[in-house]
Amino acid sequence: MSSLELLPINVAGQWRLGGGDVYESLYPATGEVIARLRAADLADVDEAIQGADRAFRTSGWAQRLPHERATVLHRAAQLIRERGEELAQKQRLDNGKPIKETRNLVASAAATFQFFAAACETLEESITPSRGAFVTLSVHEPMGVVAAITPWNSPIASEAQKMAPALAAGNAVVVKPAEVTPLMALELARICEEAGVPKGMISVLPGKGSVIGDAITKHPLVKRVSFTGGTATGRHIAHIAADKMMPVSLELGGKSATMVLEDADIDHAVAGVLYGIFSSSGESCIAGSRLFVARSIYAQFLTRLSEGAKALRIGDPASEDTQMGPLITARHRESIERYVALGVSEGGRIRTGGMRPRSVEFDKGYFYAPTIIEGLTNRARTAQEEIFGPVLVAMPFDSERELIEQANDSVYALAAGVWSRDFKRAWRIGRAVQAGTVWVNTYKQFSVSTPFGGWRDSGLGREKGRAGILQYMEQKSMYWGTNEQPLPWSQA
């Protein structure tokens, strides 16, 4: 067992060791231990939620004027920026993403706190049209204790996207980070407390999702759950929420279609497709993992794309030149290898990749080469199931109608991309494709000001945008009587 000191977790504002088993967080590039901590147990879950409910009712956070809460969130954004490099390096160790990418994730987290500070300060109630001798108003109020269950692929950004609007709305937040990436949620909790969020309003409970996440979701004091992760877990949470009559936000899996039309700018499309699937080593819910290319340019495009994939720089996440780092765990890499083998057994041909990179520098980490498979139909399992890794299935298409049918032939509907110089055609296809986000002549670009979420098995609800704060609030209607005479019903 490593000699690293055990890290404390945050239970209702108390920084102490969890009551669960000791486990180690590993650096995916080398397999070395970077942190040790004791996971939360069920007693910690109840203590954290009871403490969060108490803090919500007594700390005064929910009663602060919006601009006062906004001031604290602006301070949190400032602290994230001041500690940007430190946080980026810790995020790199936590999940193995290249340092350039983790810097962007940290910047995104800061921008998210800044945006929801502004959204909080400028959130407007409404006076609705009167239908009688009364003034009618629609107002929004915080829910109480809300839960944020976050994934391992972009921890600090995902946690900020849930914590910032929940706090802005006046709620207490219980965060359950992914078991393998606990560090960034703990850092954000410290920053928020330093910025002025009252003790107890934030808890961070690392541990197994099937135990800790389940207990949090079922707890009667938890009024809403926001979850990002796999579809099977999302369905389980939805069933629990239905029994509790509790609202949820579920950002789940994807098998996003990228469509390259015959009139596309090839340089832009090649670069965009490579970025869409192979950045983050393909460990992204919106990865463009199904590629449809017009048959007339298919051969030319696949040649260019394969050359580009082979040229991607795989290596040490600490290097400024690295484009692709390791996968999150050895187990996850094995899952991807099984999917590639499945693709071959289904009749696919590996155009490039399909193996672990061969060099001594990759021996200890969980690296996998960018992989392109062709020769499959859209009904193959490899083209239908989420792989969550650097594996692209490429297919030609012959008509716009066929393209749209195949793009929509999926249980997932999270994102899509269209590459074309024809504005009207791109607009038509973009509107016909069923997805929560459609990029045209770009891919995997995000703005905290724009709502994000999926359809069908890709989830429920939306994050981001000015309305993102309202998902953590309950709407209330108020009637203010203006009648001069008593209500007539009871008069003699």
Image (cartoon, grey):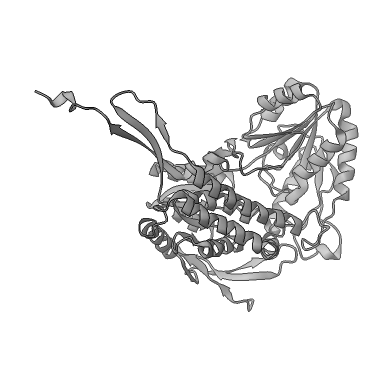
For the point 65% across and 53% down, the residue is 154
Question: In what quadrant of the picture does the C terminus appear?
Answer: top left
Which image quadrant is residue 76 in? bottom right
Which image quadrant is residue 297 in? top right
Q: Nearer the viewer, residue 127 or 29?
A: 127
Q: Nearer the viewer, residue 424 or 247?
A: 424
Judge whether 124 appears above or below 60 on screen.
above
**Relative side of 177 to 58, left or right:** right
**Relative side of 293 to 25, left or right:** right
For the point 83% across and 41% down, the residue is 271
List x then y, in percent, for residue 40: 49, 65
Q: Residue furthest bottom?
A: 3
List x then y, in percent, for residue 374: 82, 37
List x then y, in percent, for residue 367: 77, 57
Q: Residue furthest left?
A: 492
**Count of all numbered marks drawn on residues in the image:** 0
Q: Nearer the viewer, residue 192 or 93?
A: 192
List x then y, in percent, for residue 150: 57, 53
Would you say residue 181 is visible in this rendering?
Answer: no
Would you say residue 106 is visible in this rendering?
Answer: yes
Judge whether 95 appears above or below 343 on screen.
below
Question: In what quadrant of the picture does the N terminus appear?
Answer: bottom right
